[in-house]
Image (spheres, grey):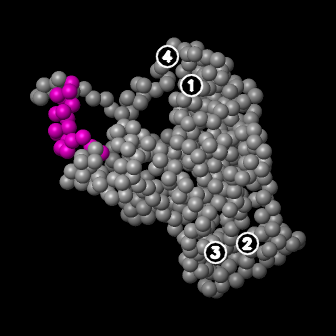
Amino acid sequence: IGEVDFKGLSSEVMFFKDLQEKTGIKMEVIRHGKYKSAVEPFLANEMSPENREQITSMLNSIWGSIAKDISKSRKISLDSLNSIAENLNGRTPELAKQHNLVDKIGYEDEYKSGIKKALKVKKDEDYNSVDILDYVTATSLNDVFPDAKDDIAIIYAQGEITGGEGSLTSIGEDPMRESFKAALEDDRVKAIVLRVNSPGGSALTSELIWREVELAKKKKPVVVSMGNYAASGGYYISCGANRIFAEPGTITGSIGVFGVLPNLNELSGRVGIHTEQVRTHSNASGYSVFTPLQPATREIIQQSVEKIYSTFVNRVAAGRKMSFEQVDAIAQGRVWTGAEALEKGLVDELGGLDDAVKYAAKLAKIKTYRTVDFPEYEINFEKILANLTGMPFAKTKEDFIKEEVGEQNYQMIERIRRVSQLRGVQAIMPYEITIR
């Protein structure tokens, strides 16, 4: 009764221009980069040709990597795979088997019986199995050379770049700075791998972390390993490394800058709220959400955006040994996959974390090593308890909200919350990518 969901990839973008007009809540946008479409939903009700171009290119690149691997594994031609996806020829077990997507149709107990038969285990006996987390732990790089005297530090930069203390799901300059300092001061550490899994965020914090990479590589090799995404600010903190590795489907690039200012002037007028300002100088009050964005203020913010964009491009140019014009031609906020980024010169090699660690060891001229992880965070005990027990009293506020509104609605609420918390000019991925 099951099915194989094999139908290609799609991505959906929501637009809020009409919603702003109906509610009176307007998002003032200042940007650089024709592909910087994080702000496009606030400016239009449909996708721009540039945005459609980059999303199409990204999906085709990711699909190409997926189809290539499946083709090799299942010995199915790429043309046949595309035909299967186009015609939904995996939607039933029989069709999936007919087109070689699966080998056998059966229940879980039959699957387990097959394992017993392959292992020559009696039907009334159990076979040994290993939990996936235990397997990962047992085969991690820490155990490859347990008696090694040299270490390679892996610094994890995960989540949006927000500044401050950071967390398990956000990147702050403080833990990054402390991590680099600890790795540099430890004589056992011979090289550093920066593992980036970030859509970007604060331009200022990105610049500060970029600086830490620059200082670190004067003393020890620094290699970047890109995860699911290392885009915009995530690419900013990566571009200066000695070597950059990305997965074929890594979302990267997005070299562009924007600022978003919520404006409640129209809404406040509708509900009868009026404001006046008293100031000593013309710019003393700065920007107010209750008054229209003045042309002079917009110009000042635009200058800031342009300066940060120029700095960003120069950082990439220096790190990748390219000219400003070469980087600008592939920048403009455009998103690339890892495979495309390799062609454009934004990354050096395609590979995972283990490949990056091995290359770091090569740069450090060491053959046996262990890995040590940075940074360290305090873990909320209640969250651990909730995961272990599932007891209602141990659930977090986020858990309760998800239960009440559903996962998709919760994600929308989170997106609105994150946008409302943005401060300063942002170097962040141009849209929230959900590939189906």
Measured in 3D between alpha carbons, the distance from the residue under mark 3 to the one under mark 1, in whole angstroms, is: 50 Å
Query: In screen coordinates, is 106 left or right of 349?
Result: left
Q: Position of residue 393 (x, y in %)?
A: 37, 51
Q: Which residue is mark 4?
A: 146
From the image, state whether disc 2 or disc 4 is nearer to you: 4
Binning the other alpha carbons within 10 Å of mark 4 as few (below 14), some (14 to 19) or many (20 upward) gives few
User: Which residue is nearer to you in this view: 116 or 326?
Assistant: 326
Measured in 3D between alpha carbons, the distance from the residue under mark 1 to the one under mark 4, in whole angstroms, is: 16 Å
Q: Position of residue 431 (x, y in %)?
A: 57, 59
Mark 4: which amino acid? Pro
**Mark seen at residue 26:** 3
Q: Which residue is mark 1?
A: 358
Q: Residue at x 60, y 53 (%)?
A: 335
426 versus 207 height, above or below: below
**Mark seen at residue 436:** none
327 in the magenta segment: no
Q: Residue at x 70, y 76 (%)?
A: 290
For the C terminus, the quadrant is bottom left
From the image, state whether disc 1 or disc 4 is nearer to you: 1
Q: Residue at x 56, y 25 (%)?
A: 358
For the N terminus, the quadrant is bottom left
Q: Position of residue 60 (x, y in %)?
A: 50, 53
